Image (cartoon, rainbow, N blue to C red):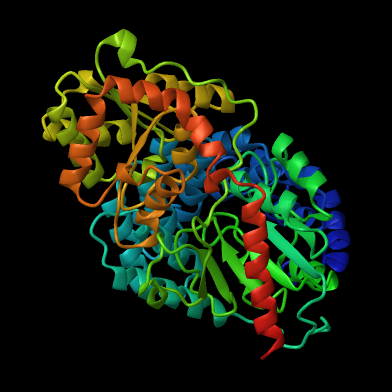
Amino acid sequence: MQAQAGRLDQAIPMLDAALKQDPGHVEGNRIMGLAMLQSGQPQKALSHIQRAIQSAPGRPDLHSTLGSMYSWLGQVDRAIEVLEHAVELDPRSAPTHGLLATLLLQQKDLDGAEHHYREAIASNPAFAEARTNLGTLMTMTARQAEAVQILRDGARDHPNHPGLMINYCVALNYADGVEAKEIQLAHQHYGRVLAALPGQVKTQWPNSLDPARKLKIGFVSPDLFEHSVSFFVRPLIEGLDRKNFQVFVYSVGGRPDNMTRRLQQAADVWRDLPRANDQQLLDAIRADQVDILIELSGLTQGNRMPALRLRGAPVQVTYCGYPNTTGIQTIDYRVIDSLTDPAGADAMAVEKLVRLDPCFLCFSPPESAPPPEPPPSERAGFITFGSFNSIKKLTPQVLALWARLLHAVPRARLVIKSDGLNSSRARATILTTLKKEGIPEVRVDLWEKLDGKNDHLAAYSAMDIALDTFPYNGTTTTCEALWMGVPVISLVGNLHAARVGLSLLSAIGLRELAANSPDEYIRITTELAGDARRLGDLRTTLRQRMTGSPLCDRVAFPSGFGGALRQMWTSHCSR
């Protein structure tokens, strides 16, 4: 009882004395194991749980506890083995199924994870975490409509569950046919859910209200490694004018690599805070007296919105990492451009929109990228269309339009590469959808993700024309394709996520490759597929075109962004 009450200093000696009298006591060892884990002695904790299992090998809860401990220690394979035995002993244990599914998901076993999430929900339909994780997994296996329905139902049943609400918001960006109003209301509701959590929003600041002084600019992100976000934030961290700005970076994720080191060298102050809780993160930012804090995640994985809702700085901005409003009232600004968010888009956002024209992004090309190779059609004798976008973006309407394109260009092939295509269910979903549209499997190549960046870029040599997705366009994927000399055809929609392709293509002077309707998408693509000379010219000139365009202007872009930051601060000072 002392251990359960959290009084470990009293509980541990009492348990130790009892176990000396009866070393195999099951409950004593179980409670001692938990107490050891709480007190930061994981190896001793394991020993006690293993001893309890020796005395009672048929108790599934002990195996589940042991699996949890292995998971906590990072021994994922061992944890999975133990948890699989636990569910054999108790097939109705929802928490054990849920933890096992999460670990399988970490190991990229999407089909296994789906099975155990469904078992968890069958055992306990009110298990909100399993429902939200299953919904997210549906997007990872190209079943966006199912994902939205699972999460929509979950949001109805658990309207104040932050994890479920945030995943519902994210899933809405990917699916076909979702009304803008539902997207808007979901994000606003998520903001209210966070606002209702305990904590006091900071309103008083020691920062000098001098509109002309040198400002402290903070960036916070979990993605400061070889991640899409880094290719767009690097020009800012490196290029903001140090006469006007001091750059602080708060890295709240792991996986450091060469990109991390480049960003770290470019920052004036770098804080590694991968394990910081909300208060520790806020304390670090506030102690540095940051004037403007720029968060780079939106509602994506690893975001720190639960902390930033309480304000880390007098002015807070969201940028780059998410194609929608955060829904958080304490995020003051969202940086976009006039093409991604034309007049009228302001109603979708709780933040004030700052339009940074001509393009809200500046791409930092990978320095070791291989040179573009000639279009594969020159040697193959047929056109290859392709997409390396996330499988989450491959909706039925996308696949149906691509099927129309394959019918319009009869000898053409389609190559799709994405993380998640190791799932047999995901592969079957894509191939079945295309088959229903009259496209046989022989015309489609499905490739799993390539880990090496240069291997990934070199794979663009297999396609003649890249096909953008909708309603969620590519961003980094589009820039990488263009850098490798592969033209991209994009379909323009009504919301930001469906207009990024328009912005990127316009920035490099190829507005004509952004279609305003599905019919125009087919026409533009088939005409380009039939123009071997233009395909060859684009292959050899796209990289140079990008380098000389606003999309890669690492001088003008940081200057314009800095001007926008100055205006934000001036507005804050005048309040």
User: For the view shown, which residue lies furthest in the top direction?
Assistant: 379
Q: Quadrant of residue 63?
A: top right
Quadrant containing the N terminus is bottom right
Residue 406 appears in view: yes
Give x and y (percent) for residue 295: 63, 63
Q: Is residue 292 above or below residue 150?
A: below
User: For the view shown, which residue lies furthest in the bottom direction?
Assistant: 575
Quadrant containing the C terminus is bottom right
Give x and y (percent) for residue 124: 39, 60
The one of 570 and 290 positioned closer to us in this rendering: 570
Q: In this figure, what is the number of numbered marks?
A: 0
Residue 201 appears in view: no
Q: Residue at x 52, y 57 (%)?
A: 360
Give x and y (percent) for residue 561: 63, 62
Q: Residue at x 72, y 57 (%)?
A: 31
Q: Is residue 391 above or below residue 344?
A: above
Q: Is residue 402 above or below residue 238?
A: above
20 to the left or right of 394: right
Q: Residue at x 56, y 73 (%)?
A: 333
372 to the left or right of 30: left
